Image (cartoon, helix red, strand yellow):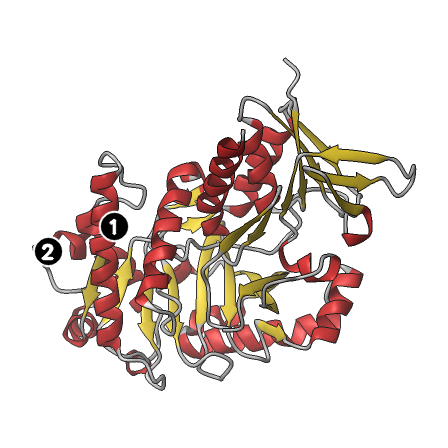
Amino acid sequence: MTKSKRVAVIGGGISGCLSAIQMSKLPNVQVDLYERKNTLLQGSPYCHLHAGGFLYPDISVQDCMELLNNSLEFAEYFGDFLDRRPLIVAYNVNSQYNPQTLVFRARMMQMVYCCWVSEHGNKYPLGHTDQYIAIFTRQDVEHFQQHNRLPETTDKAKRFHQPYVEAALSQLCDFDSIKYPFVSVNEPGIRQSELEQYLINTICGNVDIQVYTKTLVSEQNVKPVENGWNIVDLNSQTDVYYEYLVDACGGLRSKYFQVETPELLELKSSWVVYNNSHGLKNPYFPEIAIIGSRGTKDGLIQITPIGRGTFQVHYMNTNSTIFHENKEYIDTVIENDDVSYSDVIPRMQVAIHRITELMPVFSNSAPLECLWGLQRTVGTDVSKRTSQIIFRPNRADIQLTKASSIVTLVKLLTNKITESE
């Protein structure tokens, strides 16, 4: 059956790909997906759900709730591509943050999760609600120091989280380097490569999606017309008419389109390292985040196990993960589609050195890869992490900050298009 409504999606990252897939399921929609690079899904790295905003002590409780709800929808949709293991969150002893605030936030997010489960037919995308969080005290850790294990407990949540916390504590060299209490939350990681292969396979097998790679679409060749848009083929100078346009350009949006709402762009990087040390082969080794003041020596250090002795590392220091906030440098990176090798290596070494200070087992880590990308923040607050979709006549602009918000935004998009039928 020929579909009569044509939609153009500009940008072949996770936003554009999922938008194309979900819109193609609508009964009357044919999708053309445009990507300027040679292949789809060449955007920023992501490894973590960010459910509940635990890595962001400066954001509001309302934003934490929004991130959690977004992540629950993401985990329900992409459940086959999650690494189900906890995240341990602690505050650096030198940070300004109060660990009791972390505990309050964790309990608040557990209540939100319980409400979500009751509203969604008792589905548990992040595991059982009574195992969602566990709080660990200084006394728990002192017991571990004396006995090499945490104290026995009848608490169901603590029993679930204990093997993971013990695996982390066994590698932490200074128990006074963090504040107490700290939290373990049942928040899985994202297997990005597997998820993206699924998206590519789904698109390739879909007759209602036409993909155009190596095709740049910008203000120069997008023209508003009555009840839609024309995209001009710059080679043939012919017009293609679309009833609807979806801007999924991500961090490149301000380069190729006029931006009507304020936003910030940051160039950020993380590193994949290999470490085959015996202490890291523990199958219970969790994701670990030790949080301090952003941009300083005590900035967030995040260690994410991604399998087979490899770990993804973030260090929120301006000499490491927070690459550059300089707009001219960002434009250069966009133009070259790469960061400079001379910039990458010292920053990677800074991150490995910082991890080693906290966990000496990482001292012999071998760097494998630099992952980098542009993170767009809605508005002018650099700590903002929520996303939004803006609807205009015959057009939607997806402003995605965290990948785990995309399922929610695409649901809003398909609902809007359905309403306009």
Secondary structure under the numbered disc 1 in the rendered image? helix
Q: Label 1 amino acid?
A: Tyr
Closer to us: 210 or 368: 210
Please name whichever residue, 127 or 111, is drawn nearer the observer in this view of the structure.
Answer: 111
**Which residue lies under the disc numbered 2?**
155
Residue 366 figure quarter: bottom right
Q: Are marks 1 and 2 in contact (CB under 8 Å)?
A: no
Q: Is residue 65 visible?
A: yes
Q: How far apart are the alpha carbons under marks 1 and 2? A: 19 Å
Q: Residue at left 62%, top 55%?
A: 250
Check disc 1 and report the residue beneath it.
Answer: 113
Q: Secondary structure at mark 2?
A: loop
In this view, the residue in front, 240 or 202, is: 240
**Compared with residue 14, is residue 264 higher up or lower down, i.e. above or below?**
below
Q: Which residue in the rendered view is the most extreme toward the left?
A: 154
- The x and y percentages for residue 360 are 43, 74
Q: Is residue 227 placed above or below 102 in the rendered structure?
A: above
Give x and y (percent) for residue 412: 46, 42
Residue 11 location, x and y as percent? 67, 46
Q: Is residue 367 left or right of residue 126?
A: right
Mark toward the viewer: 1 or 2: 1
Write down the quadrant of residue 214 in the picture.
Answer: top right
- Write the residue at 69% across / 38% down: 228
Q: Residues within 10 Å of mark 2 (few under 14, many from 20)?
A: few
Does residue 204 sit above or below 109 in this rendering?
above
Q: Amino acid at mark 2?
A: Asp
Residue beneath the point at 75% across and 34% down: 241
Instruction: List x then y, in percent, for residue 293.
Output: 43, 81
Q: Quadrant of the C terminus?
A: top right
Q: Earlier in the sequence, mark 1 or mark 2?
A: 1
